[in-house]
Image: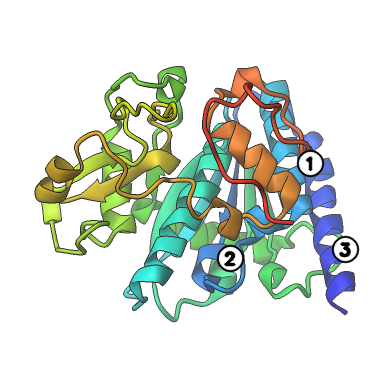
Amino acid sequence: MANRNHLRRHAYLESLLEDTDTFLGGRQLSLVHADSSFLLFDPRVPNPWLSDGGQVTWLLSNQEQIQRQGRPFMGRLFGFPTGEHRTLEEQRIFRATVKAVLHLQMYEGVRVAILPTPAGTQLNRLNFSLLSEGHFKVAWPAWHYYGSIQSAEARRATGSQLLDVLSRFSEIAPNLRWLAPYRPEHFARGIRVALPGSWRAFLHLLHGGRCADCNRQVKHLAHVDHMRPLTPEESPYHRIAAGNSVLFNLSLLCSGCNLSKSNTFATAPEELLGRIAPHPSIFAYLKRTLSYEPGRIPHSLDDRLPPAGEENVDLSSPPQ
């Protein structure tokens, strides 16, 4: 049954891609996909964006559609759970998972929005896709997508279903927190660049306003820290690569912890990479995206890791 549901999910995504293709070229085209996968977070189960090759292949196809359209017409809305109680280790896994998933979306040119969502919210409220082309609108109400019981076809909404999706989107739209997209300078190593205010607000939300090191409440006095320092301390034994300003490398620290950390490592951002992305192809691709700006690598899954010397960040090998 699990394999059958897995295949149905992939068929659903392929069907949605084909439907979207018919609208490419429209000057006013916009498309939003709502995603509730963060609301189902379990530290023992990797997020589907980091463990399901079909899901990532869909994302790469989204990137190809954005390129064909010639502008970033696609957005993905992620329900973000608030008020959850987690252990410190679970918090580390959750934060790494969220940053990795959002990083992949932004890397492929998909606009990203966070919707703070209280515990107990019905999941089907955040499982839909909505396309607009001028006054024309069409929706795909994927009510049970993450429950793995969706049919194999991405069926367009009926009249009443469309009205329901439009109503739900209008309800959540004012509360969406859109993240600024990546710029080429965010991938530059060893160079300090201005960080968007939306990223800072997101990190406060992700960390619950607490320091990632000492867990103290920091409110608005927090420092945005580069986990892999922009100018790491020199070592006579091995070369340490400088960090960059991609979302995955950023964290929230109180002023005391940030000053004591200076240019050393508090926690290497790649420490949990193998745990949150167990799929070898996704692991290898995520590893590349953390180092190279989008125009420098092929947008495809590949089990092969970069040859020695090509990757200037020393990361652990993917799990066997």
- Tag 1 and tag 3, C-beta contact below 8 Å: no
Residue that appears at 55% across and 23% down: 293
* Image spot of residue 140 (x, y percent): 71, 57
Height in image: 257 above or below 305?
A: below
Q: CA distance from mark 2 to mark 1?
A: 42 Å
Colouring mode (rainbow / by chain / secondary structure / one colour): rainbow
Return the disc, 3 or 2, that comes first in the chain's sequence: 3
Q: Nearer the viewer, residue 88 or 183?
A: 88
Q: Quadrant of residue 190?
A: top left
Q: Residue at x 26, y 62 (%)?
A: 208
Closer to the observer: label 3 or label 2? 3
- Callout 2: SS: helix
Q: Image quadrant for the N terminus?
A: bottom right
Callout 3: helix, strand or loop? helix
> Which residue is nearer to you in this view: 34 or 253?
253
Q: Say whether residue 279 is left or right of residue 4.
A: left
Secondary structure, mark 1, is loop
Residues packed near mark 2 inside 10 Å, few (<14), some (14 to 19) or many (20 plus): some
The percent coordinates of residue 39 (x first, y second) are 50, 70
Tell me the number on the disc at residue 8.
none
Q: Quadrant of residue 163?
A: bottom right
Residue at x 68%, y 63% (from the top left corner): 141
Residue found at x 34% / y 29%: 235
> Toward the viewer: 182 or 243?
243
The residue labelled by disc 1 is 303
| Residue 149, horizontal then vertical, whole percent | 78, 75
Task: Identify the residue under disc 3.
Answer: 7
Lower position in the chain sequence, tag 1 or tag 3: 3
Numbered badge on residue 164: 2
Q: Is residue 275 visible?
A: yes
